[in-house]
Amino acid sequence: MRYTSTRGGAPETSPAAAVTAGIAPDGGLYIPVPAMLPKLSIGEITALAGQTYVERAMAILAPFFSDFTAPELRHCLEAAYAPVKFGSGAVAPVVKIGPEDFLLELWHGPTSAFKDMALQFLPHLVAKALAKTGDRADIVILVATSGDTGKAALEGFRDVERTRIFVFFPFAGVSEIQRLQMVTQEGRNVAVAAIRGNFDDAQAGVKKIFNDQALASKLAEAGFRLSSANSINWGRLAPQIAYYFSAYADLVNKGWLPPGAKINFAVPTGNFGNILAGYYARLMGLPIGRLICASNRNKVLTDFFATGIYDRNRAFFKTTSPSMDILVSSNLERLLYHLT
């Protein structure tokens, strides 16, 4: 597998290099070269039904991380989804809540946020990617959060060798529980800072740091390089693809869905990473009928899909779902690349 930038101004790179970089040199986001996207048949998808979550994730993710050996990738997955972190039950169970309605539970991780599904995996991947690239610099992870990503990232990277993590959150833009989760985080390599403004301001600040070449040079001289744990990093987004396939396999396994039948996913959406993972699953052959973009009062994405116009020049509302209080959805850039 090779990765290219959504902006076309950076050379193709390897999976390990894309993961450690986080963002492309031209400011774009890394995506798999479209012609290299893996495809699964209905038979291969239904064969997942009798497998564990780790086995399912191995089948889905291995093509995306082709420079990792099978034992290396399995180690990352087993460490991420170990019972000590996700309990002794299913990692991402599907629950029937109506005749044709189901709920995919993504809150069984250590911080009770769905971000654990990716952020328990990413630190192990980054550690192995550093060894593969031969990069001697330590990684400085920068994270902008509207709530749950911050705690999940801090917990995931806590005390991981050769990494440091800095999380920025809007001072009045997260719940009190989320704030306390972050500011009380333990670990030798973690730091948290509140900023004035909203999540979009935090995200813009992080992107500005990434694009500061003078700062990058100074960090390199000191033996550090920047990377991201937000979903702009492909290593963060990719593991989310796995649970769409896992959900489908569970529906088939329980007799709730015949193999090959289409299903719809309604996805609460902020930075567009979760629902984009579903889009990639559909490109790979998962029988998805519709991906329903669910928004709160900050419905910039809902309006975009309804009108074709992305207008971020609007009022920003603080809601009871702060993780969706976003007006600049970074991952939309990846979708637009594929559509155009």
Image: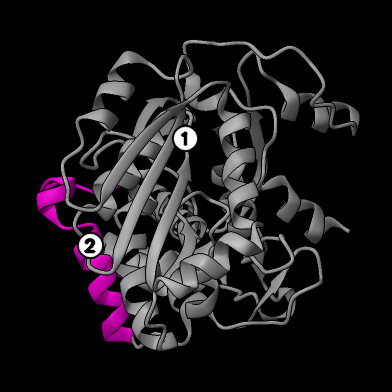
On the image, the x and y values in percent for residue 320 come to 47, 11
Q: Residue at x 64, y 52 (%)?
A: 279
Residue at 70% from the left image edge and 34% from the top image edge = 328
In terms of secondary structure, what is the magenta stretch mainly? helix
For the N terminus, which image quadrant?
bottom right
Is 74 in the magenta? yes
Please report the bounds of the magenta region as a residue range.
70-94
Q: CA distance from mark 1 to mark 2?
A: 20 Å
Residue type highlighted by circle 2: Val
> Is residue 262 visible to the viewer in this orientation of the structure?
no
Residue tagged by mark 1?
145
Residue of label 2: 160
- Which quarter of the figure is the C terminus placed in? bottom right
Q: Is residue 142 magenta?
A: no
Write down the quadrant of residue 116 in the picture. Answer: top left
Name the amino acid, label 1: Thr
